[in-house]
Image (cartoon, grey):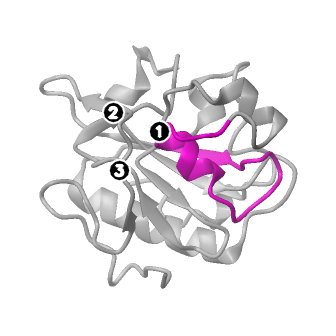
């Protein structure tokens, strides 16, 4: 799949982009009425841990993870989680949930006095971990996606999972380079 650029990545009125591979996750629901999407939450994920390129993330987000395939999967295979987007190491973009729906990516979370960050955020997973740098292609896709989201939603905050769930989450981790996020503020 070709890495999207800021000139090509757009969202339709249903909250999908044709520039992503679409893989539907059942792990979503409706956002609360009159709740503006004004935050982007950046995560990292690799399944199995510290391994890239397999189908583990897709299987987790679609409730198809085989607990016998890896010891770590036995611990997490019953989790019902998702994210709106996954950016692979090569910059390829996968969309699991419409941006108009609430994906289940943040868990127990709070930001500036507001609880339940899933209600008002878009979750973006980067294929990676806390222990190594992310790829240039991932930042390129991430910046294109952020630009598109800002065109479609009143985005005010771009944060890491660790910012909204301190003490519980560490991602996107110390190797995520916030200086490479070109559109951090409005």
Visible residue check, residue 111: yes
Residue at the spot of label 2:
28
Q: Residue at x 38, y 69 (%)?
A: 20
Residue at the spot of label 3:
24
- Determine crowd level at label 2: few under 14, some 14-19, many 20+ residues with C-alpha closer than 10 A: many
The numbered disc on residue 181 is none
Visible residue check, residue 159: no
Q: How many angstroms separate mark 2 from mark 1 (CA)?
A: 7 Å
Q: Residue at x 72, y 48 (%)?
A: 47
Q: Is residue 64 highlighted in magenta?
A: yes
Say which quarter of the image contains residue 146.
bottom left
Q: How many angstroms separate mark 3 from mark 1 (CA)?
A: 10 Å
The numbered disc on residue 82 is 1
Magenta range is 41-66
Instruction: For marks 3 and 1, give the one nearer the viewer.
Output: 3
Say which quarter of the image contains residue 135.
bottom right
């Amino acid at each position: 799949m070709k890495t999207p650029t800021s000139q090509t990545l757009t969202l339709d009125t249903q909250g999908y982009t044709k520039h992503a591979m679409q893989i539907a996750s059942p792990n979503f629901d409706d956002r609360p009425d009159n709740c503006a999407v004004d935050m982007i939450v950046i995560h990292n994920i690799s399944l199995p841990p510290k391994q890239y390129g397999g189908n583990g993330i897709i299987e987790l987000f679609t409730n198809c993870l085989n607990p016998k395939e890896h010891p770590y999967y036995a611990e997490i295979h019953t989790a019902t989680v998702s994210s709106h987007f996954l950016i692979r190491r090569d910059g390829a973009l996968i969309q699991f949930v419409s941006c108009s729906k609430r994906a289940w990516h943040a868990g127990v979370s709070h930001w500036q006095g507001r609880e339940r960050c899933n209600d008002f955020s878009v979750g973006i997973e980067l294929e990676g971990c806390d222990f190594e740098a992310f790829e240039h292609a991932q930042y390129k896709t991430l910046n294109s996606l952020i630009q598109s989201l800002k065109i479609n939603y009143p985005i005010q905050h771009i944060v890491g999972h660790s910012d909204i769930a301190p003490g519980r989450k560490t991602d996107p981790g110390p190797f995520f380079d916030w200086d490479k996020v070109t559109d951090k503020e409005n």
